[in-house]
Image (tube, rainbow, N blue to C red):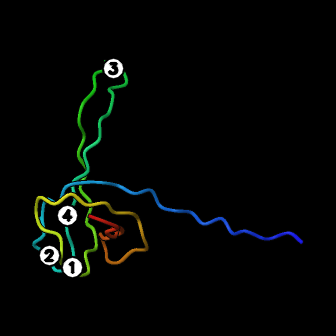
Amino acid sequence: MTQVQEKVKKAPKLKGLVVSDAMDKTIVVAVETLKTHPKYLKKYRSTKKYKVHDADNTFKKGDEVMFQECRPISKDKRHTVVAA
């Protein structure tokens, strides 16, 4: 007998800093990455902001959180908090 295993895709987890907690059940998290310029090969920092679902309003500005992609919750929210 062979056992059938389903392949479950796990969304990659991102880590960032909470920059805003003004909205209800939503935090804005800034993720900073280090990129290399294609021509000049100089490294530079790039920041991207994500709206993340925080159901209990537990995270405040300045907290570091880990989050991952999920189903769309609203127009801009496509991520949910995994851990602090």
Q: How far apart are marks 1 and 3 (CA)?
A: 40 Å
The CA distance from mark 4 to mark 3 is 31 Å
**Residue where numbered disc 3 is placed:** 41
Q: Mark 4 points at which residue?
A: 28
**Label 2 is placed on what type of residue?**
Met
Q: Quadrant of the C terminus?
A: bottom left
* Amino acid carrying mark 4 in the image: Val
Task: Residue 72: give x, y in percent of width and height.
Answer: 39, 74
Label 2 with label 4: CB-CB less than 8 Å? yes
Q: Tell me how far mark 2 sits from mark 1, CA to CA.
A: 6 Å
Seen from the viewer's position, the closer of residues 58 and 30 is 58
Residue 60 at x, y = what percent? 12, 68
**Mark closest to the chain's N terminus, 4 or 3:** 4
Give the residue at mark 2: 23
For disc 1, the neighbor class at 10 Å (few under 14, some 14 to 19, many from 20) is some
User: Which residue is disc 1 drawn over?
Assistant: 25
